[in-house]
Image (cartoon, rainbow, N blue to C red):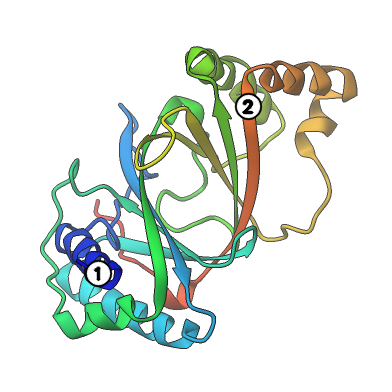
Amino acid sequence: MTILHSLVRDLARALAVGTLLSASTMLWAQDDGPGQISVRLVDVKADAVAQFEAAIADIGAVQQAAGRPFFHVYERIRGAAGFTIITLDADYNELPPAPLDSDLLDRVVHSVNGSTLLTLTIYPELGIPGAGTTAPSGEFMIARVRTTSPSNRQAYFDWQANELVPALRAAGLTDQRAGRVIAGGNENTFVRFSFTNDWTDQGNPLLASLGQREFDRLIGRANTLVVNAEMFIYRFRADLSFTAPQQQ
């Protein structure tokens, strides 16, 4: 089987079950427990960005017509070039069918070099609700990725829940979403998503709230648990995304 045929099969399977372009009307997780999301990282060919965007827009139209609640597409502006699509994992959620024809799938396949599909569990206790529960609350999304050793995974979870989140709340931050990779990558990897309309702002509200000494203590504790840290910045592509009105 060729790499292209393998990619076609992978995309067809993902789209058939809704893992590429489906999501929930909630904040990536129900209030009473964790929710599982799919994060698809797409490496788009440099000379095929327009083709990819056109195909994704058409896929979005199919999803919207089928009654899917929303799908959100992000373009990376810092870190590796490409696009990221965040959705609910269809293995954990019932979604209305939205079949896609083979020609549309081929358009996607021929515009990308490949893609990676991760499944994350999103924990409400590690996040802070925002003003809304569906569309992103800012034009830009910052994803902070932290990987621990297996022995420190629970300790890092507890640090976020018991120390970081209270500090973020005290600093007045909202719409913080956080989870851990459970499939497709290192299961000791946590991702924290935050949203802003000005990612170039160098201010640090957490530092301003805590003061240098307490800030250093808080972050120093996390650094003893983490073996790798990365940050990626994305721009929300509203033209390639949609959010259906929330059901009451």
Label 2 packing within 10 angstroms: few (<14), some (14-19), many (20+) = few
Q: In the displayed structure, would residue 118 be above or below residue 246?
A: above
Q: In the displayed structure, would residue 223 be above or below residue 51?
A: above
Secondary structure under tag 2 reads: strand
Rendered location of residue 7, percent (x, y): 27, 66
- Left or right, 25 with respect to 41, comes to left
Which residue has dot 1 on it?
2
Q: Earlier in the sequence, mark 2 or mark 1?
A: 1
- Marks 2 and 1, how far apart in space? 36 Å
Q: Residue at x 29, y 51 (%)?
A: 24
Q: Residue at x 89, y 24 (%)?
A: 212
- Left or right, 53 with respect to 60, comes to right
Q: Residue at x 54, y 20 (%)?
A: 149
Q: Viewer-proximal residue, 98 or 189? A: 189
Rendered location of residue 165, percent (x, y): 59, 25
Rendered location of residue 236, percent (x, y): 53, 66
**Which quadrant is home to the N terminus?**
bottom left
Question: Do labels 2 and 1 touch, CB within 8 Å?
Answer: no
Q: Which mark is residue 98?
A: none
Q: Viewer-proximal residue, 46 or 120? A: 46
Q: Viewer-proximal residue, 118 or 3? A: 3
- Left or right, 54 with respect to 226, comes to left
Secondary structure under tag 1 reads: loop
Q: Viewer-proximal residue, 99 or 51? A: 51
Which residue has dot 2 on it?
227
Q: In the displayed structure, would residue 220 be above or below residue 229?
A: above
- Left or right, 241 with respect to 246, comes to right
Q: Quadrant of residue 160?
A: top right
